[in-house]
Image (cartoon, helix red, strand yellow):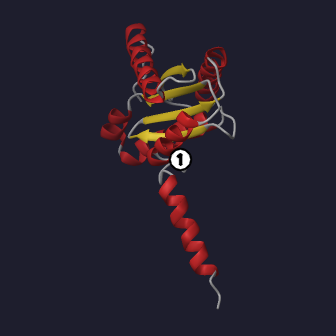
Amino acid sequence: RDISESKRLEDELRYLSTHDALTGIYNRSFFETELARLQRARQWPVSILIADVNGLKRTNDTRGHPAGDDLLKQAARVLCACFRPEDIVARFGGDEFVVLLPATGANAAEEILQRVRSSLAAFNSTRPGEPLSLSIGIATGEKGQSLLEVLNHADSEMYDDKDRQKGTGELSQP
């Protein structure tokens, strides 16, 4: 008996359970599973980057949800291009993305943050109209530290970045 169709459906369900339907990157559920796994693993230090798409609500309200969806897809593409295959890039919620960086210390994390900012600037230089704008935070945890605390610290850094951008007028609201 041919079970190829059954196997294909099983593979598709497995993929859908771990990936975000809109962007195709990992989803929050997969991220949380990996966060728990890394907490017990030997790949310390672990850094976590959080990025928030600035102006998504305004884009949805003024240009429609398809334009907002496109903004999220663009953010996912820009972020994915910046990381190693072993890094976990996930959509964390509505307009937030998170990246788990195993075996990545604070100095390397700062270099990665600069690489993301440079990639974002390069992306924006190639497209007309409103730029893609991200607020970004990053934090590093050492062995024995709670990765939930690291995640919270990265989130706080992201909000600090958002406040800095508002203060300098850099915060673009597409």
Q: Residues within 10 Å of mark 1 (few under 14, many from 20)?
A: many
Give the residue drawn at x 62%, y 26%: 44
Q: Nearer the viewer, residue 162 or 121?
A: 162
Q: Quadrant of residue 68?
A: top left
Compared to 76, does 138 lie above or below? above
* Residue 99 horizontal side relative to residue 174, left or right: right
The C terminus is located in which quarter? top left
Q: Position of residue 102 (x, y in %)?
A: 63, 31
Three-letter code, disc 1: Tyr
The N terminus is located in which quarter? bottom right
Compared to 95, does 44 lie above or below? above
Q: Nearer the viewer, residue 135 or 74?
A: 135
* Residue 146 horizontal side relative to residue 122, left or right: left
Mark 1, secondary structure of its residue: loop
Q: Position of residue 63 (x, y in %)?
A: 36, 41
Residue 130 in sight here: no
Q: Quadrant of residue 5?
A: bottom right
Q: Residue furthest bottom?
A: 1
Q: Position of residue 125 (x, y in %)?
A: 62, 25
Q: Nearer the viewer, residue 131 or 13?
A: 13
Q: Position of residue 74 (x, y in %)?
A: 54, 39
Q: Which residue is mark 1?
A: 26
Give the residue drawn at x 47%, y 54%: 21
Give the residue drawn at x 38%, y 13%: 163
